[in-house]
Amino acid sequence: MLQFCQVKKLYGNYLALDIPALTLQNGIYWLQGENGSGKTTFLKMIGGLHPFEGDILFGECSIKKKRIAFLRSVNYAEAEPLFPSFLTAKDLVELYCYTKKGDRKIALALLGELHIRDAYEKPLGTYSSGMLKKLSLVLALIGNPAWILLDEPLITVDVAAVNIICNLINNLCKQNNTSFIITSHQPFETNLSLITNTLIAHNQTISLVDE
Amino acid sequence: MNKTVIKILQKVFIIHFYKVNAGFFLFCFVVLYGVVAPGMLISYHLSLIQGMIQSPSFLGFVIFFWLLYTIKCIDFLLMQLNDPRNSFFFSLHTLSNQQQFFYLLYVHTFIYLPVWGYASIVVIVAAKQGLYGSMFAVIFSNICLMAGAIFLYRIRLQKRVFIFTNLKLTTRVIFKKHLFMLPLWFIVNQRKQMLLITKIFSLLMLYAFINLYEPEQYDIRPLLLIMLMIAMAHCTIVLQIRQFEDFFLSFSRNLPISVPKRFVLTNLMFFIFLIPEFLFVWKAFPMHFNIIHYPQLLLLPISTIVFFYSILFMKDIDTDQYFRIVFGVSTILFFIILYNPGILLFIFILGLSYILYNSHFFTFEKRVT
């Protein structure tokens, strides 16, 4: 369960998000909203990439007080991932497996499923944007996180990969009880059978559609 | 030449070049003009110029520095041309060869202006003294450097394949790509010229000090001051590292790594960065330092550089403010070192850096411009 307590995000004097109280039970959440409505900011706050006022709790674990434990339970994949061009997928997979306590074999299998296993030892500078996107998704699945935040996971990837990614999300939710918050402008209800609820980013806040 | 094109070229290349390299120029300014008493400034530079025009080896050395500066210019411009945000510049290759040449000449002349300024004075002094060989050597070398640079820009603009276009040396450093070593990789692979210039400068400074300074009695302070200057010389690299981290390593904030561990590993990274200086300084043993003072020689540059690094996590610190702080902190340290504060000062700086780092690391956010 994720709990948001008096969460506020300001960019200078501009209030980008104000979430007085919000509780997300385990499940798959589809976060919708217009461009600039605060979807990415919301995910980045939970992922520990953006500072904010207030607190976010995973169970009893506060991101402010027990950041390391919190981040062990929350993985995040960016909409447009940026990695140093001289690194290889191998470098990143090993780094994530080490810090997130993940299994390298599972990561390699995922890379294989998404057809980027062959480029495992090639510099990321040679990757296409779709390949980088796939890699960032695999990195977000490494370890055994309770929550995975995916920012526009379906953009730039091919049609075959869309189905594979949706199946992975469904399976992880069913088998490991992993929860997801996914932003997407593309409808994917048909692929993601287990969507628990929809979140709406609107009027500088985030709310559940069915409460 | 079209006014709009000129305006865009100025904004994207010329002004940006001087902004990005503000620290480098500040540093050069301090080295060339700041270390001499104001009354001695003209005579100091005249004697430097005399040395250049009378000694072919000294002139060769100066031309080598101009070559390094040209490489810096070329690297910057090619990087800008490779930046996807500047891809609209490739529309320039539809212009005639002559027009392209003049636009590129315009850009390069302006970013090469500091060299042209100094070289012109050298030429005038050489001409007045009838040393035409040196005069022509200065003019010819600068024209060659400019022509070479423009040649490379044109190749890039026309997207032709040329073996040296990227100026990528085949450096392959063999060390594991640990998360905290990535900035080191970045500097070694993508900021080679900056690294080369910084290391040449700091090692040259050490070499000159060790060979030219003979103390009457043992005193650690002069060598500590040299180490302080070495730390200062690395401030632009520190800035580049922070920019690299903000841009490419933002994902690492999602990794469950504690702040103390991050801080210790960052210190280790800077230690590795300074290994050439830490080894070279042994040439000064035992005349300039004894073994019990070696920890001070290690801790001074590391703590100072880590302090510069930690400052960059503070809110709303821009490049100008950063260089002002670097200059201010270095000046204060200069005077404190004169009082021989011992190792405690550097432990204190390290502690202060940790406090800054710890309180700002997770609250830091890239400045929105």
Image: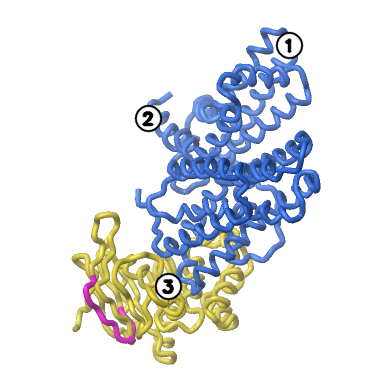
Chain colours: A yellow, B blue
Alpha carbons under labels 2 and 1: distance apart:
43 Å
Front-most of B138 and A182? B138
Q: Which residue is drawn at 71% across and 17% down?
A: B50
- Give the percent coordinates (x, y) of residue B73: 57, 36
Assess disc 1: are there few (<14), some (14-19) or many (≥20) residues with their C-alpha within 10 Å of its C-alpha.
Answer: some
Asked which secondary structure carries label 2, the reply is helix
Front-most of B241 and B335? B335
Quadrant (top left, top right, bottom left, bottom right) of the N terminus of chain B: top left
Visible residue check, residue A209: yes
Judge from the rendering whether residue B352 lies leftward or rightward of residue A195; answer left or right: right
Look at mark 2 in the image and give the residue it sits on.
Answer: B4
Is residue A179 within the magenta segment? no
Judge from the rendering whether residue A120 lies leftward or rightward of residue B323; answer left or right: right
Amino acid type indicated by mark 1: Leu
Visible residue check, residue A163: no
Picture quarter containing residue B162? top right
Q: Work out whether disc 2 and disc 1 sit on a shared chain.
A: yes
Assess disc 3: are there few (<14), some (14-19) or many (≥20) residues with their C-alpha within 10 Å of its C-alpha.
Answer: many
Which sits earlier in the primary sequence, circle 2 or circle 1? 2
Look at mark 3 in the image and give the residue it sits on.
Answer: A76
Asked which secondary structure carries label 3, the reply is strand
User: What is the chain identity of the residue bearing mark 2?
Assistant: B
Amino acid type indicated by mark 3: Tyr
Amino acid type indicated by mark 2: Thr
Instruction: Name the mark nearer the viewer: 2 or 1.
Output: 1
Look at mark 1 in the image and give the residue it sits on.
Answer: B131
Q: Which residue is drawn at 52% across and 53% down?
A: B307
User: What is the chain identity of the residue bearing mark 3?
Assistant: A
Q: What stretch is highlighted in magenta?
A: A19-29
